Image (cartoon, rainbow, N blue to C red):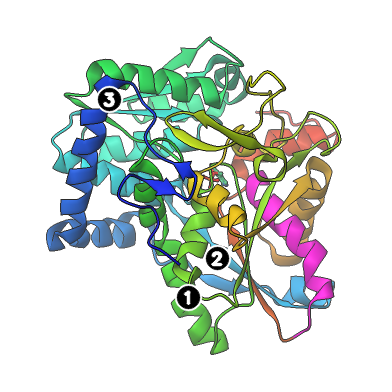
Amino acid sequence: MPAIPDSHGHYGEFGGRYVAETLMPALFELEAAYKSARRDPQFRADLEKYSREYVGRPTPLFFCANLTARLGGAKIYLKREDLCHTGAHKANNALGQSLLAVRMKKDRIIAETGAGQHGVATATFAALFRRRCEVFMGSLDVERQALNVFRMKLLGASVHPVDSGTRSLKDSMSEALRDWTASVRDTYYLIGSAAGPHPYPQIVRDFQSVIGREARKQIIRQEGRLPNVLVACVNGGSNAIGLMYPFIRDRAVRMIFVEAGGLGLSGPSHAATLTSGVPGVLHGNRTLLLQDELGQIRDTHSIAPGLDYPGVGPELAYLKDIGRAEYAAVTDEEALDAFKLLSETEGIIPALESSHAVAHVVRIAPELARDQVIIVNLSGRGDKDMSTVARALGVTLREGA
Ligand SMILES: *Cc1c(COP(=O)(O)O)cnc(C)c1O
């Protein structure tokens, strides 16, 4: 398998750098800074130190004895990214890129956010490293995710509601790119998933790959061998590629990307880009996108607020293309069932995003032999989803009662 991406950021026919001329120098500056940071022992030591002492790494690899017994097939392990500071894998990338911003002497950090998880992670590290932080968020998401907006403000960030388009993640990313075009000199744009123009997909993958490097050592220690199957939920694809990249040359290890099937793939209300997207260009890279016949980006839906981006990272599109990775879609209903199942069987309440990955394991584990080993990336914890789940289950929560 050739080195991916190539020097222009291409993953097969995907990836690249489709941005306004004014942003090209900023992308080259970032690429050069990232290359030198990777070789710098001091940068690596700082990354290691904050990962351990602040984010809480390494995260455990937990064998789910109860769930395994219940499903009666393959052995199921969870990689516990839900235990990272701020409650999800997002911290791994926000830490790494914040250290880059410091190294590049950028005083202002901007970010796009959908559900607000990446905005919270960015605001957290901006506070820690004393940077100004401004987060772009679709105005619909601002209304839907009031708690995360409040969190970002407590952390000292400003939140800019974006009123264009569908007023959600896609539009916040467009707005962040627009701001960056006018502010590159003092501003670092901290992208939250393995998407966007080169070198972002590679930078995000590399910072998230700590997940897979740890999981590899842990499974060898705990099982004495590599896993048979890796499973992760996918939006842009950062938690999935983070777990799977360190296994990419182990051809016998199956990799399964799980997308949001929403209300079902037969209708329009889903976000299953790998399953039904077609190639196109959005946010600076060529990838698979959910489009209508006229090439307009389609509205998406998922019960998981962090799974409704209409695109996917270029490396994931490529891994599908060459047949290295499998992909599947899970509906809102299946995700909710998995959310309840993991809570009851293991005492771990997963994020609704991660519940999609768990739901796919519920499908496949019973069909696999008992000596097979599955690792599921538990990308985040479910606290943020309590009101959504309560509503879906028909329960009314009363605050302060
Ligand atoms: C943001 C988020 C995701 C989806 O993003 P990826 O870049 O595809 O990983 C998944 N799980 C959780 C908990 C998230 O916060």
Q: Marks 3 and 2, Cα distance to the nearest angstrom?
A: 37 Å
**Residue 365 inside the magenta-drawn segment:** yes
Res 79 label: 2
The one nearer the camera, 394 or 88, is 88
Per the picture, the main secondary structure of the magenta-coloured stretch is helix
Start and end of the magenta stretch?
351-370
Location of the N terminus (image quadrant): bottom left
Of labels 3 and 1, the one closer to you: 3
**Residue 162 inside the magenta-drawn segment:** no
Judge from the rendering whether residue 378 lies leftward or rightward of residue 150; answer left or right: right
Q: Find residue 323 and report its image quarter.
A: bottom right
Local crowd at mark 1 within 10 Å, few (<14), some, or many (≥20)?
Answer: many
Q: Classify mark 2: helix, strand or loop.
A: strand
Q: Indicate the position of residue 163 as horizontal and vertical percent values.
A: 53, 9
Q: Which residue is mark 3?
A: 23
**Can the viewer see residue 94?**
yes
Q: Classify mark 3: helix, strand or loop.
A: helix
Ligand 1 resides in the quarter of the picture at top right
